[in-house]
Image (cartoon, grey):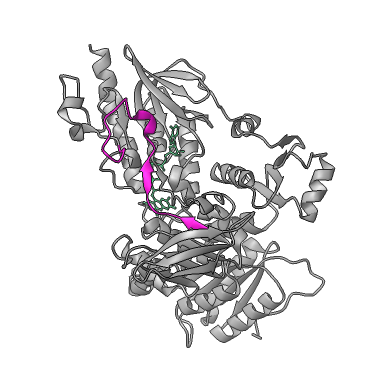
Amino acid sequence: MTEQFEPAPTTAPAIPVLVVVDADRLARVTTESALVRRFQPDYRIVTADSPATGLAALEWLASEGEDVALIAADLQLPGMDGVAFLERAHELHWDASRVLLLAMDRYHTRIPFTELAALQQATALGRIDFWVVKGWVTPEEWLYPQVQDALTKWTINHGPHHVVYRIVGEQWAPRSHELRELLSRNGVPFAFYPVDSQQGQQLLREFSVAPTRLPALIRHDGSVLQDPSLADIASAHGIQVRPTTQIYDLAILGAGPAGLAAAVYGASEGVRTVVNEELAIGGQAGTSSLIRNYLGFPRGLSGAELAHQAWQQAVLFGAEFVFTHRAIRLTLTGDNHIITLNDGTEAAARAVIIATGVTYRRLDIPSLDRLIGTGVFYGAASVEAPALAGQEVYVIGGANSAGQAALHLARFTSRVGLLVRGQSLAVGMSDYLVRQLEETPNLDVRLGTRVVDGRGTSHLESLTVEDLRTGRQQEVAATAVFVLIGAEPHTDWLRDVIALDERGFVLTGRDIPQSAWPESRAPLPFETSVAGVFAAGDVRYGSVKRVAGAVGEGSVTVGSVHQYLQLLTSR
Ligand SMILES: Cc1cc2nc3c(=O)[nH]c(=O)nc-3n(C[C@H](O)[C@H](O)[C@H](O)COP(=O)(O)OP(=O)(O)OC[C@H]3O[C@@H](n4cnc5c(N)ncnc54)[C@H](O)[C@@H]3O)c2cc1C
């Protein structure tokens, strides 16, 4: 044990530990005292002066079952570099934030260029969560904001924190999954208690919940919703489910990145805007645990976080959001476009942006379709991953979203198999992800493989996989499979209204065939074959299928909407 490390007194309440490993005594003491000043007594600070003493301390903490929230290690440790140390540390405390400490170089920049190569590799391979350059004048500048951010996330995942709802239900029931997904993707804090757990049973008794109508949502004020519809939950939560006005300047369909960006730019520029979203803000991006390629976020950011910040921004600018119903019809009456929702409600708007994105392509294997939500998931890896600790899971798909899901799951589960039909990952996946997959020890990539069957009664138990070259089939144990095999645009309801390509993507601007464009003027950028109806993001033919692309298209389309509204008023 190290001279710095002292085991917690056995009578002390368990408090999370922050570990600092740095051989440079002055730097170590400076970091330690800054952390002590700001984070004690809520956290215990432990320091070590070498990799060996650091690992010994971490092993001891693991054996005692103590929570380690953050591990900071200097890049230049004697005998082992800080990145390798953090990797070893991660095996002992998989959910602690990993911080690389870097000496300041002579340029005094927030990325020391002398260590750039090490830093690039560590971030590209997901071996660290963030870095801090040492030598700051005040910790408020460079240390505290990043540490606080990491501790907030850690607390939300582990500690007691504010919850709006406590859900009691069957762990693997599709409705339990649906409610968890709805609340999680809309950023509503909740805790889930399986009905057969002691706490679940206690909650049923305490709030007189009928066990025949589960899942039940117990709100923070003690009111109970039994087996509620999504609209019931939205109404109980004060969320608008119907438009408040008859006529809007702009109706945006879909609140993924494209719809949210259009809402922010439309509302902030004085356009009376309504956004209609069927399920959750953020769209597909809301299911992505870490978006690393979005401009301005070198450490990456969660899709849900991006969506919630954008939603708040749009609401503050005056955009109205209508949730839980989907647009099912679009018709034209005079200068107004009428949008009909699936509850029959109608709203009129002078311009419309279709930002309905795409939906996942299905496997079409009946035995697996039956288990959707009970072990078979389409894209929701970030929601289910924490519940799969220690399990064997599979991801199907060969593109970036499949690679990211597999890496995220590998942080929680004992083993992840990535099943890919093609013979090479390079065809569909970014190079940095391919390298990260290769470096992840509990992840196997199986090329030239497809899933042909699955088994399980109440939830998934196994998959049958086939080697496409030999035709040999093998049954493998699996608690969950995440299917990410491409997507189809959500445009069935528009088929007779606007021009689509053969796969259902919306044609806009110059891609509209002349025969489908009735106006004497040329279509505006992002305008569809119906004047005043625009399309942005993944649903649009030719879009790049990236968050930044959707955000860019959503905001730029608002420029075309302005031009169209001017054309209307000058007629
Ligand atoms: C797991 C995963 C990881 C990803 N990671 C990255 C990444 O790291 N970097 C990156 O750049 N991109 C990433 N992507 C891709 C990126 O998320 C998408 O390109 C982006 O979300 C597209 O935005 P969008 O607004 O066009 O559509 P979507 O995000 O698909 O949003 C469309 C919205 O419309 C709603 N909707 C659909 N039909 C209707 C209707 N009729 N009425 C009302 N609402 C409707 C849907 O519920 C949805 O919320 C990832 C995607 C996934 C699935």
Front residue of 77 and 559: 559
Front in this rendered view, residue 483 or 241: 483
Find the residue positioned furthest to the bottom.
79
Q: Is residue 497 magenta?
A: yes
Which stretch is magenta? 481-505
Q: Is residue 1 magenta?
A: no
Residue 340, image x, y percentages:
45, 22
The answer to whether 201 appears left or right of 118 in the picture is right
Task: Say whether residue 96 is left or right of residue 566.
Answer: right
- State the residue at coordinates (57%, 69%): 94
Report the image quarter containing ligand 1.
Answer: top left
Report the front residue among 464 and 113: 464
Q: Nearer the viewer, residue 427 or 323?
A: 427
Q: Position of residue 157 (x, y in %)?
A: 62, 57
**In the displayed structure image, the side of residue 42 where residue 527 appears, left or right:** left
Identify the residue at image location x=40%, y=73%.
438
Magenta: main secondary structure equals loop
Can you see residue 136?
no
> Taking 239 as reference, is 165 left or right?
right
Tell me, yes or no, if residue 165 can be seen here. Answer: yes
Q: Measured from the top left, where is residue 289 in percent x and y?
A: 48, 55
Residue at the (29%, 20%) spot, across then down? 565
